[in-house]
Amino acid sequence: MRYDHLIADARDAELTDSTRVRAAFDAIYCCSPHLELLAQSLAALGLNADDASLVTQLADWVLNVAPRGPLPMSPNEAVALAERVRKVTEGK
């Protein structure tokens, strides 16, 4: 899927919070280079330390907890993070 479709799902208040947070993560992943390991792909984004930490927390939730709670962040926070990641990667 493309970033635009995924971020639209992340913003869709009719979906569950878990689905929205997962869609935001998938949107972030669309922005990353597709290297062999997820951690390598996310590290290659070149984010500031705070956003890198948030993306790591989100990835950990997706890989180890999802779709159960607790969520690592609210859907709105996940959307904001995805938008910041997109802005950083568009500048490269």
Image (cartoon, rainbow, N blue to C red):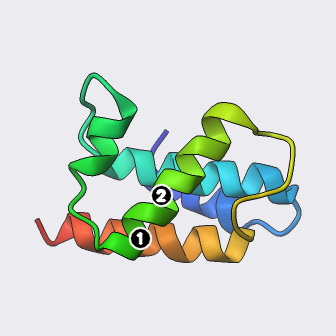
Q: In this view, does 43 lie to the left or right of 38?
A: left
> Is residue 77 visible from the viewing direction of this image?
yes
For the residues labelled 1 and 2, say whether their Cβ atoms are less than 8 Å apart. Answer: yes
User: Is 25 placed above or below 53 here?
Assistant: above
Give how far across and how far down residue 78 sits, in percent.
Answer: 61, 67
Residue under circle 2? 55
Q: Is residue 52 left or right of residue 55?
A: left
Secondary structure at badge 1 equals helix
* Residue at the limit of the structure toward the left, as seen here: 92
Cα–Cα gap, marks 1 and 2:
6 Å
Residue under circle 1? 51
Residue in view at x 83 percent, y 69 percent = 13
Give how far across and how far down residue 18 sits, in percent.
Answer: 80, 52
Q: Is residue 88 left or right of residue 53?
A: left
Secondary structure at badge 2 equals helix
Q: What residue type is labelled 2?
A: Val
User: Is 31 placed above or below 77 here?
Assistant: above
Name the one closer to the observer, 56 or 2: 56
Give how far across and how far down residue 25 sits, in percent.
Answer: 55, 51
Give how far across and how far down residue 28 sits, in percent.
Answer: 44, 54
